[in-house]
Image: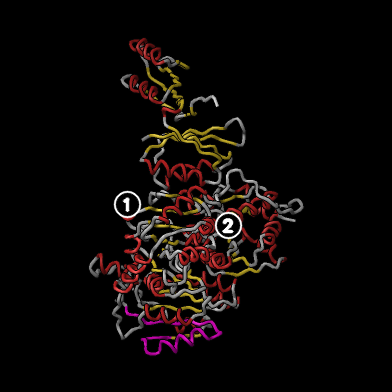
Amino acid sequence: MTGADSIVKCLEAEGVDVVFGYPGVAICPFYNAILNSDIETVLIRTEQNAAHAASGLARVTGKVGVCAVTSGPGATNVITGIATAFADSIPIVVITGQVNSELLGSDVFQEADITGAVESFVKYSYLVRDADDIPRIFKEAFHLASTGRKGPVLIDVPIDIQNAPTSKFKYPESINMRTYKPTVKGHAVQIQKAVKALNHAKRPIICAGGGVLLADACGALRELSERYSIPAVHTMMGKGALPSEYKLNYGMVGNNGKPYANRAMNEADVLIMIGARVADRAISQPDIIFDNKTLIHIDVDPAEIGKNAQATIPIVGDALSILTEMLESEITCNTSDWVDTLEEYRNTMAVVRHPNPDFVDPGEFIRRLTDSMEDTAVYVADVGQNQIWSCAYAIVRDGRFLTSGGMGTMGYSIPAAMGVKYACPDTQVVAVCGDGSFQMSMMELATMRQHGIQGKIVVMSNGYLGMVREYQHYTYKDNYSVVDLSGSPDLSKISEAYGFKYLRLENMKDCDAVIKDFLSTDESVLLELIIDPMDLVK
Amino acid sequence: MKRIYSVLVENRSGVLFKVAGLFSRRCFNIDSLAVGETDSADVSCMTVVSSGDERTMEQIEKQLNKKIDVIKVRTFDESEAISRELMLLKVKYTKSNRAEILEICDIMKADIVDMSKTQLMIQICDVPERTRVLISMLSSISIVEVARTGTLALPKCADS
């Protein structure tokens, strides 16, 4: 048995079903060994997308996503995918091939110091120096990726280590890491303080972040909100933690959020921030907003508490565990006046769009599309104007809404949706992107065709990098610089070339029929929307 | 505000890079850094002196604790600790100023550890403030080169 066989056995022991990746000489022993396993392999078309596909899989299954790429450029290409997973705390394990141990540091062909390069984007990384360490390292890596604040872990394996003979395989049953013991259970005294603060609250509000979804705490959050009539808002990563149509869900906060959601948060007297980082796009001036209120900050990562905002009641631990404990106490707060006020805000402060009738209105399209989707569907939004419209108008019920929130990585939606669809073939999965982000990932249409993964892709075409154009519109008075996307390919021909059915919508006239066609077909399908190049998200 | 962080870490390759990288990536200051093995060969102690506002000081501790290779972080003010720095300092001397140099060394409790016909090497082990005083006292005489360890510190002895 070799180191490569040992790696495959580790993946089997972890229950891994699929590895997304791209081979090269330095990872070939691994790709040879995996032929003897039931673990499937998917050949993505560029390494960054292997990490995105693993991320999509991880987010919907709750398992650790795995990808494997070669040394040098293979490893450096995957960095953006790793950084994207890190920013959103998504559990993935990235295996990179590496040059021969004895040549490390001599700048030989396809050598890159990948553990050094990814240091600030990984939860942890390993450079394997002895094949006998492989079981321990993989056990630790999967544990690190999937516990505490989740995130990517990278394992760099030199080719000689993959080829080295190893002793009989024995996967460790337990972890022995003296330096890593994440807090799960919230401090009882702190939880009681939070309950007490809620008892005295007149205008309480919950702000849910991506951590609620990562902790699988959506049900408990809904229970807390519903039982005590505590209204809720959410960050971009928290979209879907509560159903969009749930009556106390007042939508997304932040500079691209709902005005009434921001107002609700500003006027609250007790704010429960849960699994949210208080990052600049959600809350631009935390010191001002939190000045006059009790901030209960719940996060599994102690470093997030107090980083951007000073919490009145910090609670470190797992969101599900803490919410479950909070639900064991009786909370007495009367919020009926507060809810009436928020309802009034919702009715009077809604953003009214004035769409150009000659084009598809992206907001209304997304609303109708998601309204027609299955309740458990997964909607993957890309980055750009399409993302902001998706956040504002997509209806999420019992399904999921995925996007690259922290890093804002263009091209995320197609490979992530591919990872989701691979893991959950019976789930309806739709990727929505712009014509800019589409061209960053369209090579993966071949991957979908090769591996029989059904793709449902919506491309909003406006011939511009819309989000940057909008920024230049406001900031540089329409002095556009490098945002014109002329030269883009004919998407009907791209669809044909990759074996996708092509649908096109130029205005709202046939919207419902086209959506029906798009959702009902069993083929892979690309729907191009022609949207107004001058349309704005604000 | 100055604070001392005494950080016990796994004695593995790359750990210094990870801790130093954390400071640079998050724009935390490093006033000084000293690293060495502890009484157990698999544990190193890093002593970092940093400065910044209160929130930064708290973040440094939390971010250090997040690093998987960090075993334990202790933090204290200079007043709560015994701190020392070792400095080696080479000066050019002449007949006319040799006595003055020796006098300064005597006052500062510094030792002459090496000499040639034109140069003296002085060693001082003291609190960081006094090593700075020695440099300033000798700066009018020609200093050839200086090597300092950075601050080492342990919290003061307790009875419990």
Q: Which residue is mark 1?
A: A291
Q: Position of residue B159 (x, y in %)?
A: 54, 24
Q: Using the rendered image of the protein, determine whether residue A67 is visible from the camera's viewpoint.
A: no
Q: Secondary structure at mark 1?
A: loop
**A143 is higher (above) or lower (below) than A462:** above
Report the side of A140 relative to A165 (left or right): left
Residue A515: in magenta span: yes
Question: Looking at the image, is mark 1 or mark 2 nearer the viewer?
Answer: 1
Front in this rendered view, residue A482 or B12: B12
The earlier-in-sequence mark between 1 and 2 is 2
Q: Which percent across, then down, holds residue A237?
A: 45, 64
x and y percentages locating residue A276 in the rendered image = 44, 58
Residue A399 visible in the snapshot: yes
- Quadrant assignment, res A447: bottom right
Q: Quadrant of the N terminus of chain A?
A: bottom right
Locate residue A364, reporting x and y percent. 37, 80
Instruction: Name the residue tied to disc 2.
Output: A146
Left/right placement of residue B100 relative to residue B124 reads left
Q: Secondary structure at mark 2?
A: helix
Disc 1: CA contacts within 10 A as few (<14), some (14-19) or many (>=20) = few
Q: Is residue A29 left or right of residue B89?
A: right
User: Mark 1 vs mark 2: same chain?
Assistant: yes
Task: Give the answer, above or below, for where B55 lies relative to A429.
Answer: above
- How far apart marks 1 and 2 lie (CA) works out to 35 Å
Question: At label 1, which amino acid type do we have?
Answer: Asp
Q: Amino acid at mark 2?
A: Ser
Q: Dot 2 surroundings within 10 Å: few (below 14), some, or many (20 or more)? A: many
Could you say which is closer to the camera, residue B102 or residue A421?
Answer: A421
Identify the magenta region: A504-532
Assess whether residue B118 is covered by the magenta stretch: no
